[in-house]
Image (cartoon, rainbow, N blue to C red):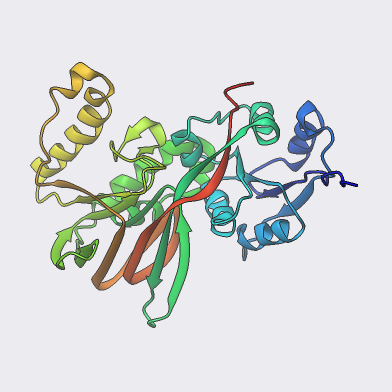
Amino acid sequence: MPTSNPQPRAAVVYNPTKVDEAEIRRAIADEPGSAGWAPTLWIATTEDDPGSGQTKRALAEGASVVLAAGGDGTVRAVVEALADTDVPLAILPAGTGNLLARNLDLTIDDLAESVRIAFTGADRRIDVVRIDIRREDNAITHHAFVVMAGLGLDAKMLAKTDEELKARVGWLAYAQAIIRALRDSHQLRLRYSLDGDKQQAVRAHTLIVGNCGTLTGNIVLLPDAEVDDGLFDLVMMRPQDLLGWLQIVGKVFWENGVLRRTEVGRLFTTKDVHALRYLRGKELRVRFSKPEEIELDGDGLGYATAIKTWIAPGALAVRLPNQTS
């Protein structure tokens, strides 16, 4: 005699400094789609563990879906544990960035809708980017990201962002950090190999590896990036003077942000400029001349002397709106 399927169970991995647990509990209790589910598992992140260990616990306790409630750092930590499983990620956005949610066209300011998607949505598989970071003591740490990894000016900008100011004014706090970072004339000196090709030496202000292309403020940094194309996109910013910075602003804000949005506008886009080089690939190896700050999905992860990063196609299931409902 066949046995009935066990009740599905949701797990909420939440950052208590970013979200209101009571509000989320009410939203889940009010969601009709949660009827028939087993009691939700609630696990708070900590300063020492921003979500990976909590997600592993959720998987061990039979979670059918893991709801990441927090900022980009919480989402990334949850992804590290969820990747290469069949358990989907549902995002309850909080914080200032919410970059994966934005790039997936998810709602970022409607908790009830986000909860509804978690319980009644459909799953889509997207890519995850794996990265090994070699540290100053030659130790190697293993991570994953779904938005972007940045070194140089990008990582310095995030390191210089005032967290208290960011909490008050949101992404506008980055403007202050950009001004402070631009005063730093240091350039990355690196050697890189893309997809096993011959190693090349480059100087650049910023190196970014992206799985997604859009930043906060609807800034399109990587116009060809797709979350499920089996490739990452790479950009090197290497302005030598004011003209170089103007070229970057023109490409990113005007061409990527305006012209590329229409078929007619795309006819007027230009070729790559010297100050901004785009590449695509599946595996990247980089060695730096000195330890450099690195960030993953908006969180600083210390210093790297070398990195190896590669794409894991379709490694993550994400819960999205059910288009048939």
Q: Which percent across, then down, holds residue 121?
A: 63, 32
Vertical relation: 1 (above or below) 36: below
What residue sits 35% from the left and 62% below the top?
309
Looking at the rendering, which quadrant does residue 244 occupy?
top left
Number of numbered discs on residues? 0
Left or right: 255 as drawn, with respect to 314: left
Q: Can residue 31 be seen?
A: no
Residue 119 seen in this snapshot: yes
Q: Residue 228 placed where, x, y %?
A: 41, 42
- Residue 76 vs residue 226: left or right? right
Q: Nearer the viewer, residue 187 or 194?
A: 194
At horizontal 14% and vertical 28% (from top left) the residue drawn is 269
**Farthest residue in the front direction?**
1
Q: Quadrant of residue 93?
A: top right
Rendering coords of residue 178 (x, y %): 31, 46
Image height of 267 relative to 163, above or below: above
Q: Which residue: 65% across, 49% down? A: 17
Q: Residue furthest bottom?
A: 137
Q: From the viewer's perspective, is 148 left or right of 107?
A: left
* 11 relative to 227 in the view: left or right: right
Q: Nearer the viewer, residue 154 or 92?
A: 92
